Image: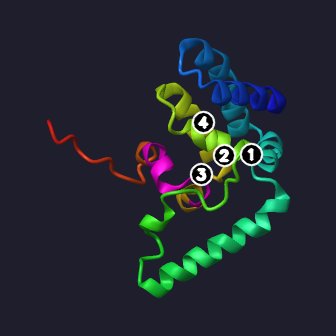
Amino acid sequence: FLALLQVQIGDTLVGGRVDDAGAAALTPILVVMFKFCQTNDNFRKAIRDAVFPPEAEAHFRTLVEEQESKQARSGDDSNRQSSKNMSPLDAPKGTLRAKLIKLLTWPQSHIKRFAGELLWSLSNSDPKEFVYRVGMGNGMPILAMKGFAQMPAHAYS
């Protein structure tokens, strides 16, 4: 599944296919991976290790500690994410995690939804970890869906 996901995400993002064919190829892979991650801890760990490699975790944890220290010094509530968290703390360009995060801004809602659900599951369903991993801007729709953020009301309603 992982190799298939990497190939399909690469083809979709590089080709920039914002069409039914691109979504038709990517959606079932995201759905199956998300469902497996929900029900099988070993599968979720294997996918988590591929998306968030263990060798990168020490660096990620250091960035989280630095961010939390900055928030504490500036007087931010530790449970509230500041504007400094609009982008992911660690998502190097070209990595699988960067590509999955890119899908959170995809125009087709089902791609956004299942990429977000997969990343949510890989973030241990922890809103704070999720924001550090994907960024507040990218994660806002999933956070709102999970009840952790309120989307602004439409100005034209």
Of callouts 1 and 4, which one flags the residue occurring earlier in the amino acid sequence? 1
Q: Are marks 2 and 1 in contact (CB under 8 Å)?
A: yes
Q: Where in the figure is residue 109, as x and y percent of width and height?
A: 47, 28
* Residue topped by disc 2: 98
Magenta segment range?
132-142
Instruction: Give neighbour class at mark 4: few <14, some 14-19, many 20+ (Cα, 10 Å).
Output: many
Q: Is residue 54 visible?
A: yes
Residue 10 percent coordinates (x, y): 72, 30
Tell me whether the residue at label 2 lies in contact with that at label 3, contact meaning CB atoms closer than 8 angstroms.
no
Instruction: Give me the disc on residue 125.
Output: 3
Q: Residue at x 71, y 65 (%)?
A: 60
Could you tell me the amino acid type at mark 1? Answer: Thr
In the rendered structure, the answer to whether residue 55 lies left or right of residue 130 reads right
| Number of dots carrying numbers | 4
- Which quadrant does the N terminus fall into? top right
Q: Residue at x 71, y 70 (%)?
A: 61
Compared across the picture, whether 152 is left or right of 63 comes to: left
Q: CA distance from mark 2 to mark 1?
A: 5 Å
Q: Earlier in the sequence, mark 3 or mark 1?
A: 1
Dot 2 alpha-carbon crowd within 10 angstroms: few under 14, some 14 to 19, many 20 or more: some
How far is disc 3 from disc 1 in space, using C-alphas? Answer: 22 Å
Where 9 falls versus 117 (above or below)? above
Name the residue tied to disc 4. 115
Secondary structure of the residue carrying tag 4 is helix
In the rendered image, which residue does mark 1 sit on? 95
